[in-house]
Image (cartoon, grey):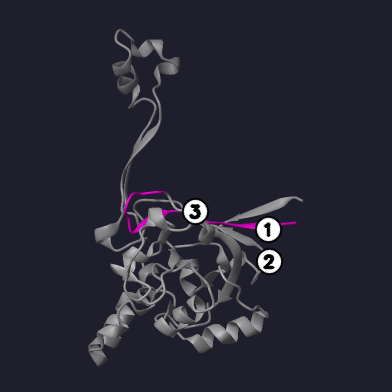
Amino acid sequence: MPRRIVDLSVPLEADIASDPPVMLPEITYLDHQATAEQVMGFFPGLKKEDLPGGEGWAVEMLRIATHNGTHLDAPYHYHSTMNNGERAITIDEVPLEWCFQPGVKLDFRHFDDGYVATAADVEAELKRIGHTLQPLDIVVVNTSAGACYGQPDYLLKGCGMGREATLYLLERGVRVTGTDAWSWDAPFAHTAKEYERTCDAALIWEGHRAGMEIGYCHMEKLTNLESLPPSGYDISCFPFKIKAASAGFIRAVAIFEE
């Protein structure tokens, strides 16, 4: 049976609005001319003119955080504990079975930027698309942020998933979720205004902190979610294995059997 693969990952790219300034990635590109001396250093006596076209190799030097680009957060990112007191697992400990499962898309593009989605919102959307959640379904949320990646206002765009919405999914066996926004939670600028009004610290990162009760992972900075139907495909999101880390880079894809 033929397969169709849809890329759900943004490229790792410098000099765009993809993260807060303190977290922006830096990429130094070394082309074939710049690295000829590197190649020569491995082989004493080798001259540049001995290389084809005088060229070395292309290589890139990266200064990045584990949360740059499309990535998978481990429970350790949210808190030191999960499952009501257990040690939170790091990205190298995430069960691989979580990372290749049927996908389900919730279309929340109609919600205002900064809106905090509720369990009722999730339940209503599942009813609209006619899907009953199964354990280990990978649930991705299409927000208004997806169309704004790299633009100056990207970090202000999209709705967030609140604690009760997240727990609604987790209580039904979901262990990997995802969003095309910068964060699974509402944009910080919107939460900051609500915190200033209420002084309620429980509002801060409430979707992430749900992992303290039930450990789970989520993907952030996905793309192309608008091209996905509500269901009928698998999602693959295996993370790069970084020892004891809070997140790992992924090449998230949707796989259709056609």
Q: Is residue 147 left or right of residue 196?
A: right
**Secondary structure found at label 1:** strand
Q: For the residues labelled 2 and 1, say whether their Cβ atoms are less than 8 Å apart.
A: yes
Q: Is residue 171 in view?
A: yes
**Amino acid, disc 2:** Gly
**Secondary structure found at label 2:** loop
Is 40 located above or below residue 231 in the figure?
above
Assess disc 2: are there few (<14), some (14-19) or many (≥20) residues with their C-alpha within 10 Å of its C-alpha.
some
When asked about the image quadrant of residue 226, the answer is: bottom right
Q: Over which residues does the magenta segment extend?
A: 241-258
Place of residue 188 in the rendered image (x, y in percent of width and height, measured from the top left): 31, 75
**Amino acid, disc 3:** Phe
- Residue at image coords 68%, 80%: 130
- Quickly name the residue at label 1: 256
- Residue at image coords 45%, 78%: 166
Name the N-terminal-most of marks 2 and 1.
2
- Residue at image coords 57%, 85%: 123
**Distance between the alpha carbons at the discs numbered 3 and 2:** 20 Å
Tell which tag, 3 or 2, sits nearer the viewer. 3
**Distance between the alpha carbons at the discs numbered 3 and 1:** 17 Å
Name the N-terminal-most of marks 3 and 2.
2
Name the N-terminal-most of marks 3 and 1.
3
- Residue at image coords 41%, 70%: 215
- Quickly name the residue at label 3: 238
Q: Which mark is residue 232?
A: 2
**Distance between the alpha carbons at the discs numbered 2 and 1:** 7 Å
Magenta span has 252? yes
